[in-house]
Amino acid sequence: MAFSILTDTSANLPTELVKRYGISVTPFSFFVEGKESTCTDSESFDGPAFYDAMRHGAIVTTSQVNPQRHMDYMEPILKQGSDLLYVCMSSGISGSYASSEIAAAELREQFPERTIRTVDTLAAALGEGILVMHAVDWRDAGLSIDEIADLLLERRHRVAQIVLLDDLMYLSRGGRLSGAKALIGTVLGIRPILKGNSAGQLVVCGKVRSRRTGIATLAEKFAKLAENPGQQRVGIVYTDCKADAEALAEMLRQLPEPPKEIMTVCYEPVTGSYVGLGTVALFFEGIENVREY
């Protein structure tokens, strides 16, 4: 039976892929100086202008997606007679998945003949996006919606998310780091490296004193932890530091076994406002228990 794949802003997929594979996207809202905007794909988002506004002190906030927003994008798909697979941002950093479950429960009552599966990816940005693309590949290979949802629930634990931050204060403002620790890190010039853990949360896994070392560390993580690196579709995401993202991509290409495909995109505004300026992140599929390293 035909089914549709729905994801959200956080998946950060290039617009070309969203259009080519018919992926639907639930947009997340963000606010710049109180003015609300939404972002559905990379093409519609002016990343340089957004991060320049942040650099010049603009107040940027986000809001949790409520169940009604999810229903607004799920219901039309179901009315068209299609089953629905929703691949969602990590519950470890957002309440969006919980809201999607509320919406899905209500819609299952309205459309009892339809199958609705929701998948908490325990990931964000192109970590989530990689799993969306797996869903596309498996759909096109003829797998059922239930088979794909179950495979995603297994595969999500293999998605490595390694994030180099430049300014700890953004995490502090988001309530993820104490102000004192953020201040100390900024004064000492320490740049933290974060990872996505098994609960889908971002936690510190290392510290470096220079961006060059940090970017090299991301490449080293891929070389050490990637599963079948030469068969990988990997993702690199950046805020206002495209040159660093390109440098990381080149480091990966120079490895003895480079990835077969590298997706490089600007961080969408919701997650980007959380990680802050000067952030570059790497997403790939790793060895067993990769989130524990």
Image: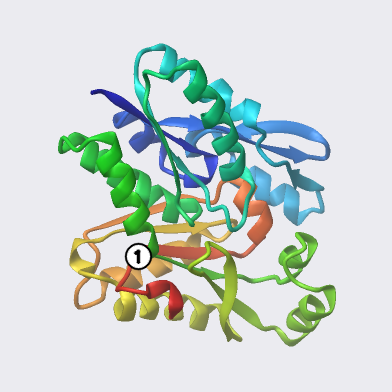
Decide: is 19 above or below 283: above
| Residue 199, above or below 60 | below
Vertical relation: 99 (above or below) 263: above
In this picture, residue 283 sits left or right of residue 210 = left
Q: Please report the residue visible at 43 percent of the width from the left and 12 percent of the height from the top.
A: 79
Residue displayed at 43% across by 65% down:
282
Q: Amino acid at mark 1?
A: Arg
Tell me where residue 168 appears, x and y as whole percent: 71, 72
- In terms of secondary structure, where does tag 1 sit? helix
The colour scheme used to paint the residues is rainbow
Front-lying residue, 152 or 280: 152
Classify the position of the C terminus by image quarter: bottom left
The quadrant holding residue 3 is top left
Total number of numbered labels? 1
Which of the two residues, 107 or 293, is positioned nearer the viewer here? Answer: 107
Q: Residue at x 25, y 70 (%)?
A: 227
Q: Position of residue 133 (x, y in %)?
A: 31, 45
- The correct choice, above or below, for 251 with respect to 15 in the image is below
Residue found 26% across the figure and 23% down from its top: 2
- Quadrant holding the N terminus: top left
Q: Position of residue 99 (x, y in %)?
A: 61, 38
Instruction: Provide residue 68's location: percent of width, then percent of height.
Output: 64, 26
| Farthest top residue in view | 80
Residues 72 and 180: in front is 72
Corner quadrant of residue 149: top left
Q: Nearer the viewer, residue 124 or 199?
A: 199
Q: Which residue is mark 1?
A: 158
Crowding near the residue tagged with mark 1, few <14, some 14–19, many ≥20 C-alpha atoms within 10 Å: many
Q: Residue furthest left?
A: 141
Describe residue 86's horizontal placement relative to residue 35 as left or right.
left
